[in-house]
């Protein structure tokens, strides 16, 4: 079902706020839990999502030594998480350790690499981080490193998804935030794409937050996006 490809972020600080959002949008089957909510509410939110039979994208962006990253991934499997993020820049050994740590688990999460935070611009990449590559080239190299290390997919801008899809083959999962229907505000997202265009370009899943959660009528916004996506097939 096309609606299964839309992930809505629970971008709220408390458990109460998160439950209110879940209650407001019972149609949504796939939710993202990020650092703000996880630090604020703890794993309780994951138990609630499990009880409600929701799919979970746990977006904690692990970045540490191999042993620690592997342990964190193993711990996450206790909560029946579907997608889990870690930074590609943790390095090959950490990526491999993460993949190996959960390989034996029954219902293991798919691991997604963060290639490059989209908040970084080319100037910061060159002058602050001293990386002598253009942004898209760097993101691509990080995705290739992740794939070679046994990671299942990557989070990327919809503007990078076509190139990543071409280079990383069909079974590499690509998850895109920065998605905006033509009728909604871009907000602070700079390089946006419509849901239809992002799926056509090769995205498996879309993370769509404020166009739904901050809409005057969130259910209507959700249904409108689902209808528009259904035309993509
Ligand atoms: O409200 P909006 O649709 O912009 O929400 C996008 C979600 O995706 C937020 O939870 C944001 O933190 C996350 N995200 C992003 N860009 C990235 C990675 C994650 O917008 N590169």
Image (cartoon, grey):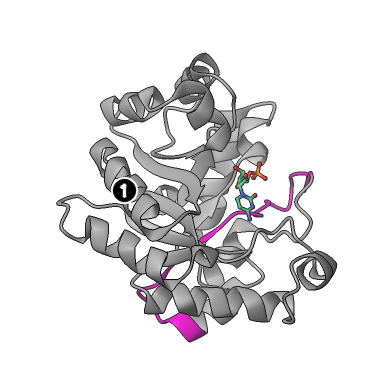
For the point 46% across and 25% down, which residue is it?
22
Specify whether 117 is left or right of 126.
Answer: left
Q: Is residue 127 left or right of residue 85?
A: right
Is residue 51 shown in magenta?
Answer: no
Residue 173 is covered by the magenta coloring: yes
The residue at the point 50 percent across, 14 percent down is 16
> Residue 221: x, y in percent?
61, 37
Give the residue at the far top of this rendering.
Answer: 16
Q: In this view, does 96 lie above or below 205?
A: below
Where residue 80 appears, x then y in whole percent?
26, 40
Q: Is mark 1 within 8 Å of ligand 1?
A: no
Residue at the extreme bottom of the image, as rendered:
167
How many C-alpha atoms fall within 10 Å of the one at disc 1: few (<14), some, or many (≥20)? some
Query: What is the magenta range?
Result: 167-187
Residue placed most toward the observer, 221 or 129: 129
* Residue 152 vs residue 94, the one in the foreground: 94
Q: In this view, does 157 lie above or below 109?
A: below
Q: Which residue is drawn at 61% across and 73% down?
A: 139
For the stretch drawn in magenta, the main secondary structure is: loop
Q: Name the residue under label 1.
A: 71
Q: What element carries label 1?
A: helix
Residue 44: image quadrant is top left
Query: Quick check: can you spot residue 156?
Result: yes
Q: Position of residue 12 (x, y in %)?
A: 59, 26
| Residue 96 quadrant | bottom left
Position of 113 with respect to 148 (left or right) is: right
For the question of whether residue 151 can be seen, the reply is: no
Q: Nearer the viewer, residue 126 or 138?
A: 126
Q: Identify the image quadrant of the C terminus.
A: bottom left
């Amino acid at each position: 079902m096309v609606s299964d490809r839309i992930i809505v972020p629970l971008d709220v600080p408390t458990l109460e706020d998160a439950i209110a959002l879940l209650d407001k949008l019972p149609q949504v089957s796939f939710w993202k839990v990020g650092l703000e909510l996880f630090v604020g509410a703890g794993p309780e939110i994951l138990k609630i999502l499990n009880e409600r039979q929701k799919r979970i994208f746990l977006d904690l962006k692990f970045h540490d030594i191999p042993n620690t990253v592997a342990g964190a991934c193993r711990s996450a499997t206790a909560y029946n998480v579907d997608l889990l993020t870690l930074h590609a820049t943790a390095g090959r050994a950490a990526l491999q350790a993460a993949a190996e740590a959960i390989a034996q688990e029954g219902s293991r999460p798919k691991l997604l690499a963060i290639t490059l935070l989209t908040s970084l611009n080319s100037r910061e990449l060159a002058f602050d981080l001293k990386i002598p590559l253009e942004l898209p080239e760097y993101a691509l190299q990080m995705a290739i490193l992740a794939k070679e290390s046994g990671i299942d997919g990557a989070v990327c801008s919809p503007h990078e998804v076509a190139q990543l899809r071409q280079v990383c083959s069909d079974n590499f999962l690509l998850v895109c935030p920065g998605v905006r229907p033509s009728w909604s505000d871009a907000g602070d997202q700079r390089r946006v794409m419509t849901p239809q265009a992002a799926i056509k370009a090769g995205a498996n899943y879309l993370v769509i937050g404020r166009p739904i959660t901050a809409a005057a009528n969130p259910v209507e916004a959700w249904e409108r996006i689902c209808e528009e996506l259904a035309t993509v097939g």
